[in-house]
Image (cartoon, rainbow, N blue to C red):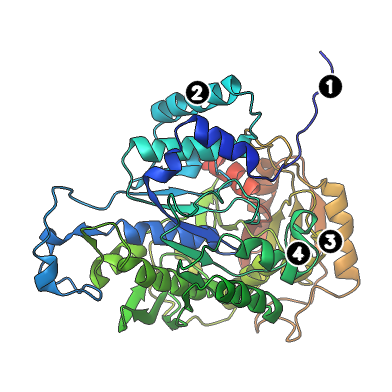
Amino acid sequence: MGPTTVPAISLGLQRIAALLAALGNPHRAFRAVHVAGTNGKGSVCAALAAALSAGYPVTAINDDDVVDNTSVTTMMTTTSTTAHLRVARFTSPHLLTPRDCIWIEGATISSEMYADVSARVKAADARASIGASPFELLFATAALAFKECQIHVAVVEVGLGGRLDATNVFDFPENPPICCVITSISMDHMDFLGETVELIAAEKAAIMRPGVPVVIGHQPFAGAEAVLLSHAASLGCEVRRPTPLEETSFIPFEARGTLFDETVCIKMPFNGSHQLENIGTVLAAVDAVATRLPPPFLLSSHRVLEAISAAKWPGRLEWVRVRGLSALIDGAHNEDSARRLREYVDRLLLPVHPRHEHISENTPNTLSRSYTRVVWIFGIKDGKRVNRVVEELVRPGDSVKLVPFSLPEDMPWVRPTPVGVVKTATESVLSAGKGLSESSGPVGHDRTSSSVVRTFVSIEEAIDDTLLEVAAAPGTLPIICGSLYLMSDVYRLLVAQ
């Protein structure tokens, strides 16, 4: 057998359109909330799908429900035998297996249904000689599963970019999105989307549809924001801008915001101050979607907030105990997400945390101790700007352990950056003194020692070595980060425990 060729990512809509047509266009059987962006779109999708799952028929209204923009008298004249709004979610990449990308009514699609639907999709692809990519096959599998489960609304995350992404199939007049959402845009995937934030924003703006409301989240780059607003105006889209959330407590993480024109208190589902922007975007999207749900469904403030607080999104600023090591794990994989991770870490390094005596279920008991240094277990995907990411993360005095990650299933084009390459980049950053913020880090951070950068053949070896380091220096904070694919390796270890 000759050598296999690693397929490249192939953007375009021709193959997915043919495949969906061969399946009877299942994506037209449900309404979609289409979500694009560089950072935060996964968190937004997870919390938004949870929020919409709180939708209920008008016959279930009670005194505690505060509904949006509709007369209770009018609502009570509508009847329905459907107990709840059936919501699904499509996100990528997967954490453990491709079926993790497909979430139906609160749970990952069953292995039995995934195998059945996926096989039928692949058979349709073969019969029509379409040659769909793995991602196109996966999205078509999700769409067909959503149709067969009689889903009302699906929250659909763009895979890459937007304009030529396989998910960009919700069109007039057949079935336009119910709402579009654009999260924070920054520099990533430049080889596919362009070398400037303006070009990247234009690719992502292309999911907008004429007259469909669009929620535009906080944009760190004015150029990207200008492109999004201009494109929305050209299509006559109503633009919703999130009201910034105000943090009211760090531990437990709580905030104050606005939903349905009322001030509400929110138990934040995910850690990190950047989630104030993401959950603010979710609230704006809920508000935009509320009056466009398929009848007779409604959303109420208290049900939505309860659902958001219970949302889960693994591998993002999450505390775990793996192989005996209590660690913070995060899928930060570009400069912006690395910066957000470092901001959160710097707050943990402060000698005193606000209300730090209150430990939430998502944080370890060890959070109450004083951390003085960080050990990074780091692995990053090939093609990323390693120097820029390391500059955001690492400070003098930090310990750095570099690891590869396992190749993800059905994504043979994904490769880790060789650890030797990452080591050279990390040492270059540290020797140049670039791994320092202008304020040179928080009070209490040990910057008196030099950083040690080492390579390991596996994440298991790095974790075991870190256990010894933490035992020798109790003020050490272990963090595993650099790629969502590295988070997959962590979760495999957790499942095996």
Q: Which residue is mark 1?
A: 3
Cα gap from disc 1 to disc 2, whole angstroms? 26 Å
**Residue 423 higher or lower than 408, as above or below:** below
Comes first in the chain, label 4 or label 3:
4
**Residue 75 higher or lower than 418, as above or below:** below
Q: Which residue is mark 3?
A: 426
Mark 3 vs mark 2: in front:
2
Residue 117, given in percent of the width and then of the height, sits at 44, 28
Secondary structure beneath disc 4?
helix
Q: Nearer the viewer, residue 302 or 146?
A: 146
Which residue is farthest bottom?
439
**Residue 71 higher or lower than 497, as above or below:** below
Q: Which mark, residue 119?
A: 2
Cα gap from disc 4 to disc 2, whole angstroms? 39 Å
Comes first in the chain, label 4 or label 2:
2
Q: Amino acid at mark 4?
A: Val
Q: Amino acid at mark 2?
A: Ala
**Residue 68 higher or lower than 133, as above or below:** below
140 vs 57, left or right, is right
Determine the image quadrant of residue 149: top left
434 vs 161, left or right, is right
Q: Amino acid at mark 3?
A: Thr
Secondary structure beneath disc 3?
helix
Q: Which residue is mark 4?
A: 389
Cα gap from disc 1 to disc 4, whole angstroms? 33 Å
Mark 1 vs mark 4: in front:
1
Decide if residue 153 is in sight here.
Answer: yes
Residue under the image location 61 percent in, 42 percent down: 489
Location of the N terminus (image quadrant)? top right
